[in-house]
Image: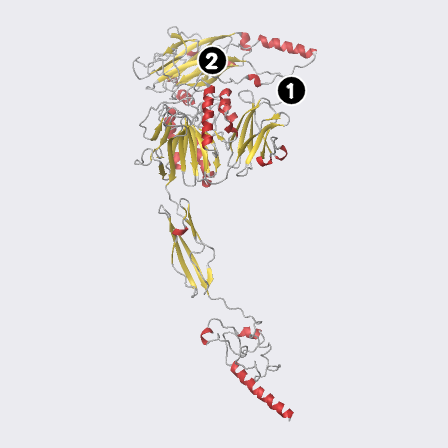
Amino acid sequence: MDTPTHESLPGSRRPGRARRALATLGAFSLLAGLATVGATAAVAAPEAPLMTSATTWRYSENNTDPAEGSADRLVWTRAGFNDTAWKSAAGSFGAKNGKATGIGPYTASTLLNQYIDGVAAPDVKTYHFRSSFQLSAQQLAGTAKLTGNVTFDDAVQIFVNGTKVAGLVEESDAKIEAAPEAERNLMYAGVNAGDPVTREFTVPATALKAGENTIAVALYQDRAASSDIYFDLTSLVAAAPEPTSTPAPSDSAAPAKLSDIVLSVGSNESGRGLAWYSDIDTAQVAQVATRAAQTGADFPAAVASTFPAKGAQTTSKEYNRFADITGLTENTEYVYRVGSDANGWSKTYSFRTQSFSGDYNFLFFGDPQIGASGNTKNDEAGWVDTINVAQAAHPNAEMLFSAGDQVETAANEAQYESFLAPEQLRSIPLVPVNGNHDVGSKAYEQHYNVPNLDPNAGKATSATSSGGDYWFMHKGVLFMVLNSNSSDYAAHEAFLRKTVAEQGDKATWKVVAFHHSIYSVASHWNSSQIINLRAALPKVISDLGVDLVLQGHDHSYTRTYLIKDGVVANPDEAAAAPQVTANPGEVLYVTANSASGSKYYNVTNPTAWWASVINQEKVRNYSSIDITRNAITVKTMRSQAFGDEKPVNSVVDSVTLKRVDTAAPVITAPTESEIHAGEDFDPMAGITAFDQEDGDVSSKITVSGSVNTRVPGVYTLVYTVTDAAGNEATFTRTITVLAAAEPTPNPTEPGTDPTTPGTDPTTPGTDPTEPGTDPTQPGSTPSASATPGATSSATPSASAGAAAGHGENLAHTGFDLTLPLAGGAALLLIMGAVIRFMRRENAA
């Protein structure tokens, strides 16, 4: 959060961006135009401010209810109330510990009585102010509304002619309206926001009247022991009505002025968001192509992908456009432009994707709050330098994460232009967070195209403020970004639980970000808003298994101990430990210091129970955050030297977050579970084990049990592996040994078929007395392997022999030989003898 200044007010961007309509030709049109000009001049709203810081006020500081004794609580806010006994002075008004100085960057022109007894706490509960301004009947007719700016601490309600027109701190306003009617004028009701804040308010024309208008302000202290109080209504101006006539058509071919281009994250690493402003309301698109498709300086339009853009008029009377880029591929450089053929294109920009999985780095920045110093250009220079330093040191950073309060004044477009000045914001995706200095205008929503926005979670509290929670996934990390300006804690919790339920199983890590640090040590640590957030969020965050919370708001650096459910998880954790190991539900919270140098806060709670590391050197910082499968390292560095001993990029603090390893390794085994007797078998072949912390632990696997490959049966093997944390995994594997496979008979092999030459006794050469016919030679006798001991391994069936066309008593080759073989041999000898005898008889 932080301190507003008078340097830049909402709407300070030049209205010259609006286009002039062309004059209509023709005498009748000319006369009509002159008549319109004359009529407008007659009812013009007043140009000069109706009120400024120099306006004189009547005020009450004596801790009394100005309506006491009246049935009308708001009698003091109307004309005719007798305030002559009140004091009178010009603004600003305030006090800090009884003095007019040191109220943040402010010094009160008029010192208020801070204490009821004038000496010490308790503080005055509520201060009351009255003043007036004039509007003529003609001015009133030309006035659509009044717009004011007020700087205050802690809360205000503003009334005009008895009508409440503003309650500028939602939480306080709700508390006031919920109190009994008789107590609302005098009660503690503010929010301790540290330094005074600036807010814009609107007075509708219906609350105004011709003549004198009474304005009244109730200024509330937040508690009895508050250190300060402040009020300064810096401006109140009239705004003319919007033209009711139909404007002349714009020149559709005129070039558009395109500005405020910013690249943001997509729903995942394959997408990006684009946002930009245009000074004319025409159809526009984003075009994207690979760098490889570009030749020379010309944009490769012929091969570019086109993404339509949508948008509307902005609070600065310009037109915003959002385009969602999808379908990107990893490790690719792209070029892009925005605009249209009809109205012109922006220059060509580029970005690159990196691997869509694995380790990565992103950069985290605390409140840039451009304009908070009172010098926007100085703040811009510090911001640009920090981005340059960080990006040069970490050229592969994949995101730029801003903790909120991008600008000092929510609707100030000049401050937005300075925040968007770094060229890196068009090439590295931005992750914006809604800060208390951003929330008061729709400009925050109009400048940033964020993914998966839920407008009903962290909902905007008015028609002119911004809101919404959103999430995205980047390389296995689930990021959830909350609008902590909203005190609807139930809606925040519902958003977190729904997102984790739908996306959490895909995430290796979970990170939450919101602006208002609940574990800081500077001026905001004990404000009521922070106390309420600290009571509401930590248990939910622990329950959902969030690992890291990124915060801003307090412009000083704090790193906590590991916290679970709102208390330190391990009382023995050492301060400033370089590595912390979290059990389930234990969370690391980091609060960033200023990235621009626009403002710093002194440490006011150096002994905070949650603080492991505190640093406030009042030099610019940034944090480099490295994500791996098993660790997150947050290294915070100086982007500005702190003396000679601490140069640029020297380390403020570094911590590595790991998780207690409760996951056992995973054993993987082959699917084959059967072998045949006699086959080789290695029980470790194909067995691996992987652990999410230790990686490959296959070498640590042991196996119990054995497999006898000679004996058919079912065998059980149990594999065991233990990781470094002692988590053990076992895997049981069943191996079945089948009987040995039967050899397949092959009738074509020599000597196996009795019908082949040499086996038929009737064919030439079968004479057993001739060479080669000796039944003791190969081919006609059993093989040497046909031993009695081998015949049990495989026995052909009788049906197999019959099917082959042989009698069951024929000799078989192979291992199963029977006695008919010997009988056959004897028969052959007898037949041979008969044949020889017959030959001799014939010869005789």
Amino acid bearing label 2: Ser
Point out the residue furthest to the right here. Answer: 26
- Identify the residue at horizontal 37%, vertical 43% (top origin): 661
Q: Residue 365: x, y in percent?
A: 44, 28
Q: Secondary structure at mark 2?
A: strand
Q: Secondary structure at mark 1?
A: loop
Query: Which quadrant does the C terminus fall into?
Result: bottom right
Q: Is residue 247 left or right of residue 777?
A: right
Instruction: Look at the picture and state if 395 lies above or below 41.
Output: below
Q: Nearer the viewer, residue 466 or 178?
A: 466
Q: Which residue is mark 1?
A: 249
Q: Nearer the viewer, residue 132 or 419?
A: 419
| Mark 2 Cα shell of 10 Å, populated few (<14), some (14-19), many (≥20) | many
Which mark is drawn over residue 235? 2
| Res 545 visible | no
Q: CA distance from mark 2 to mark 1?
A: 35 Å
Q: Nearer the viewer, residue 166 or 41?
A: 41
Point out the residue furthest to the bottom here. Answer: 844
Amino acid bearing label 1: Pro
| Res 528 visible | yes
- Identify the residue at horizontal 36%, vertical 31% (top origin): 559
Counting labels gives 2
Q: Nearer the viewer, residue 187 or 219?
A: 219
Query: Which quadrant does the N terminus fall into?
Result: top left
